[in-house]
Structure formats: C-alpha cells, structure tokens
Image: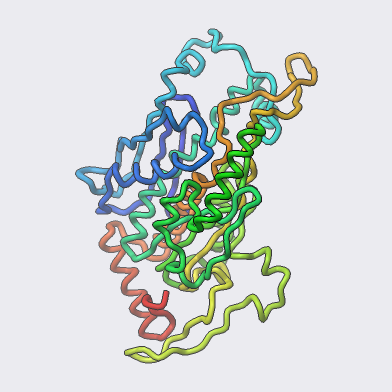
C-alpha cells in the first residue's frame, strides 16, 4: 500500500471491526468525533437494512494517538459491533467442536460463499460470509478519516456523490469545477445525490425493489481537489496512481468497475475531443500554464496534473435477495432457493463513503512517498516548498486548481 499500510480485522457479527494504520506522521490533530462523522455517513442512505438500526458506530483509539495528536506510531482503531451480543454462541472463538448453530450449506449467487468454501475447505458458509460481508468496510472508513485529515493539512479535499442508482441518473458535472456541485445537498440527500429530482426518483426505485424482493446497484464519484501536480509516477508499475486508485476502489465489496473520469465514454471519441488543450494565463507574478478543461479527470501519465481528480465506481446490486435466486444445498446436493441473510436493498450511498476512504488512503500514501516528513509540520512544509516552486516556474497555481 506504499508508504501507508492498512490492516483490517473483524467479522460481521464478531466483537469489533479493527484497523491498524501505519505511516501517519506525528502531530496530526485527530479526534474520535472526526472518525465517527464518516462512520455515521457510511451508515446512512435510503435502502439500508435492519443492521443499521442496531449499530451506532463509535471509534475507540487503542494506540497511536495521545491527547488528540498522532504519535507517528501505528494507529489502532476499534469499532464495536453491537449486534455481537446476539451472536455470542454462533461467533464464539472458544470451544472447538461445540455447537455454533446449524451450518449454512446453501450459497448465495453473486456472493463469496461458494468460492470461499472451495478456497478454504469449509463446509459452513458462515465461515466465509462473516468476513466477506461489507461490514468490514467500517475499518476502512475509520482509517480513511485519518488520511483525509492529513490531506486537509496540505489543502486537499475529498468528497463523494452518487450519480446513478438503478435506472436513474443525474447530469454529468464539469470535472474542472468541484464548486459546480452543491456538496451540502449531497449530504442532505437520502441517496447522496445533489439533484433533488433524481434523488426522489432514486428513492422510488428503491421502494419498488423492496416490494419485489430485489436489490439495486449504481455508480458513485469520488472527487479530490486542491491536489498538486506530480503526485504518483510513471517510472514503474507501482508508481502509477491511476492503477493504485482503481485497484483500491475495486477492492470494495460489490464494486465491479472503476474508471477515471468518463474513461469508457471517452474510448468512443477521437483524441481531439478527449485530451485537454493548454494555454497561458497571466497572473501577478507572470504567466501560468492552464488547461482549458478536465476531461482527463486530474490524471495524466500515472500522475496528478493539478486539476480535480475524479474517480467513478460501479457497484453491482447486492447479492442477498429476499426473493432469493436458485442455488444448491451442498449438504444434500439438491436444488433449492438461496440462503437469505439480513441485508440492504441498496448501499450505493454508503459505498461512496468507503470510496472516499480508499481514495484518501492511496492519495495520502502517494503524498507521503513524495514529500516525506516524520511530523505533520515537516510534511506540510515540504509540500508548500514544492508548490511554491511550481508557481515560480509557471507550472501550476493553487488558486486555479
């Protein structure tokens, strides 16, 4: 994971979700309230299931933070699973051979169930689904809140929004102007969409899916702006930031496609309609190079180019359906309906918060690789010196980004 290393642990109905984040410099101001703000955003969204009525995710720092400041040592955060109290016997780590409840032998199409049984030699789907559950993303969001706080120290902002849900889509935004999106409206929307009309129709789609025992997917965008050019690299495979970002967002459960900007639509166009022309613009201290648009969505040659970075991710419909699909009972090898676990109808609004966290992790790691610093003060000073050098050479100016 580059300079930053993230390890997560925890089962869906186990005692807690835990993350260990290594590589954050000392002196970063952070609080449990900051982490919990993103944890709360992850829990929200029209179409979430009954689990969210049980959990009220609270972050507990176990290591790496003292008196509201990071220590430069590994940060450990624990988030209790309140529902664990209802699963003590089923999820007990003790008592080998004791009864953990009836085994689940009917895998769900579209889930990790069958492949997980094959991989590990299990006979109970419970041994797979507990970790394969999207509950694991709680730990990602907790660590992402730390990375966002670090990026804010150097003027970088990360926000996400839903752009389509089911068959309903909203208009494409100007990738060069993050201020063209009303981000407060995104947070007020029950489906994280700034378009009120589209938001209402998305909710109606979710209601129909609920009545039909269906689930829905969609597409979200993660925007990062105030990012200086030259973060990432082209010298090696691992340096390329677009590959790292797409891999990170693609690792989120149920994400089946990731693109930088409108990459798939751009693939159908000619080059003159895709690449961003450059020109000079006069400033107080001389001329600057600027781009006339941002169709590249902030990345060129594996590096940031100083324009807002926009990543889009496609989430498939959740595989657990109340009107379950045909499956096989592996205990008897007979055709049956799939096992049904408590689940959401739609979790795209929550997934965009996880997407923000993963983008923050990769971007913060790439920044630290380039600028270093054992303390936040040293890190920020290095970034400022680099940006001042870019402005002196006319290669970038923060006011334009």
Where is residue 387 drawn, in percent x and y?
Answer: 36, 75
Instruction: Name the residue furthest left.
Output: 67
* Residue 254 quadrant: top right
State the image coordinates of residue 125 (x, y, percent, origin top left).
63, 23
Query: How many marks do you count on the picture?
Result: 0
Answer above or below: position of 175 versus 72: below
Q: Nearer the viewer, residue 117 or 374?
A: 117
Q: Please name the residue shown 49% across and 10% down the image.
A: 95
The image position of residue 40, as x and y in percent, is 39, 41
Image point (50%, 65%), residue name: 309
Say whether residue 112 is visible: no
Q: Is residue 75 visible?
A: yes
Picture colour scheme: rainbow
Q: Would you place residue 220 above or below residue 156 in this image?
A: above
Instruction: Specify whether 60 is left or right of 272.
Output: left
Residue 183, picture quadrant: bottom left
In front: 376, or 286? 286
Pick the quarter of the image with the C terminus: bottom left
In this view, which residue lies farthest toward the right?
Answer: 334
Name the one closer to the observer, 182 or 83: 182
Residue shown at 63%/39% (left/top)? 208
Residue 294 x, y percent position in the rendering:
54, 74
Q: Along the horizontal axis of the image, is 324 left or right of 199?
A: right
Residue with the most extreme top position: 98
Residue plotted at (42% across, 80% down): 396
Above or below residue 157? Residue 125 is above
Quick check: 110 above or below 170?
Answer: above
């Amino acid at each position: 994971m580059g300079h930053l290393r993230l390890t997560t642990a925890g089962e869906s109905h186990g005692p807690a979700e835990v993350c260990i984040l290594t590589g954050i410099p000392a002196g970063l101001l952070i609080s449990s309230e900051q982490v919990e703000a993103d944890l709360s955003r992850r829990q929200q969204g029209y179409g979430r299931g009954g689990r969210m009525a049980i959990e009220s995710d609270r972050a507990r720092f176990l290591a790496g933070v003292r008196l509201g400041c990071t220590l430069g040592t590994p940060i450990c955060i624990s988030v209790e699973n309140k529902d664990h109290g209802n699963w003590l016997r089923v999820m007990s780590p003790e008592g080998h051979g004791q009864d953990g409840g009836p085994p689940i032998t009917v895998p769900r199409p579209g889930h990790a169930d069958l492949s997980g049984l094959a991989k590990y030699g299990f006979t109970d789907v419970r041994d797979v689904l507990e970790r394969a559950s999207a509950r694991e993303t709680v730990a990602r969001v907790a660590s992402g809140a730390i990375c966002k706080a670090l990026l804010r120290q150097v003027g970088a902002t990360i926000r996400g929004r839903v752009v389509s849900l089911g068959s309903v889509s909203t208009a494409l935004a100007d990738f060069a102007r993050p201020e063209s999106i009303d981000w407060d409206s995104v947070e007020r929307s029950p489906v994280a969409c700034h378009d009120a009309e589209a938001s209402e129709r998305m909710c109606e789609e979710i209601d129909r899916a609920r009545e039909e025992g269906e689930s829905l997917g969609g597409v979200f965008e993660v925007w990062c702006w105030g990012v200086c050019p030259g973060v990432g690299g082209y010298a090696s495979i691992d340096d390329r930031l677009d590959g790292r970002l797409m891999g990170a967002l693609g690792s989120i459960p149920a994400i089946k496609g990731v693109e930088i900007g409108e990459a798939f639509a751009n693939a159908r166009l000619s080059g003159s309609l895709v690449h961003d022309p450059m020109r000079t613009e006069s400033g107080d201290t001389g001329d600057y190079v600027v781009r006339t648009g941002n169709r590249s969505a902030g990345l060129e040659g594996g590096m940031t180019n100083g324009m807002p970075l926009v990543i889009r991710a496609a989430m498939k419909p959740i595989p657990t359906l109340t009107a379950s699909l045909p499956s096989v009972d592996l205990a008897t090898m007979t055709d049956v309906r799939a096992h049904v676990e408590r689940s959401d109808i739609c979790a795209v609004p929550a997934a965009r918060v996880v997407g923000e966290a993963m983008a923050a992790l990769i971007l913060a790691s790439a920044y630290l690789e380039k600028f270093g610093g054992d303390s936040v003060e040293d890190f920020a000073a290095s970034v400022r010196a680099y940006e001042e050098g870019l402005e002196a050479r006319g290669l970038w100016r923060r006011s334009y980004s």
